[in-house]
Image: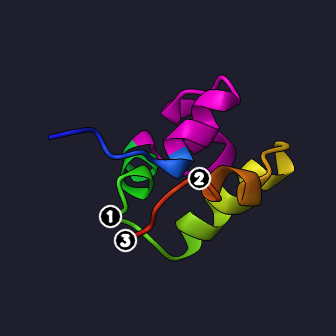
Amino acid sequence: MAKKDNVFSDARKKLGLQQSDVAKKLGVDQGTISKVESGRVLGTTFLAYLKFLSKAGIDLNEIIDGYDFK
């Protein structure tokens, strides 16, 4: 099975960050970031991650334009 593209992990890697780096910035543990990236967690952590990426200079529209969300 092919690996599914992941908007969050791709954006994080574009910034040169590890999951633990993002977790520290958001005040959560690395496991929570893993769950957000895999689609298992939504809510406030999900929104905080979006806000973090945006403030870090990631254009979320540019990133998600190339993804097929079926």
Residue at the spot of label 2: 66
Percent position (x, y) of residue 2? 22, 39
Q: Residues within 10 Å of mark 3 (few under 14, many from 20)?
A: few
Percent position (x, y) of residue 16? 66, 23
Location of the C terminus (image quadrant): bottom left
Q: Nearer the viewer, mark 1 or mark 2?
A: 2
SS at circle 3: loop
Q: Which residues are magenta?
A: 9-30
Viewer-closest of 39 and 25: 39
Locate residue 36 relative to residue 56 in the image: left or right. Answer: left
SS at circle 2: loop
The residue drawn where x is 45% and y is 47% is: 6
Whole-number angstrom distance, CA of label 3 to CA of label 2: 13 Å
Residue at the spot of label 3: 70
Locate residue 21 relative to residue 59 in the image: left or right. Answer: left
Earlier in the chain: of badge 1 and badge 3, it is 1
Tell me the kind of residue under disc 3: Lys
Tell me the kind of residue under disc 2: Gly
Does residue 39 sit above or below 38 in this rendering? below
Residue at the spot of label 1: 40
The residue most toward the top is 16
Viewer-closest of 54 and 21: 54
Tell me the kind of residue under disc 1: Arg
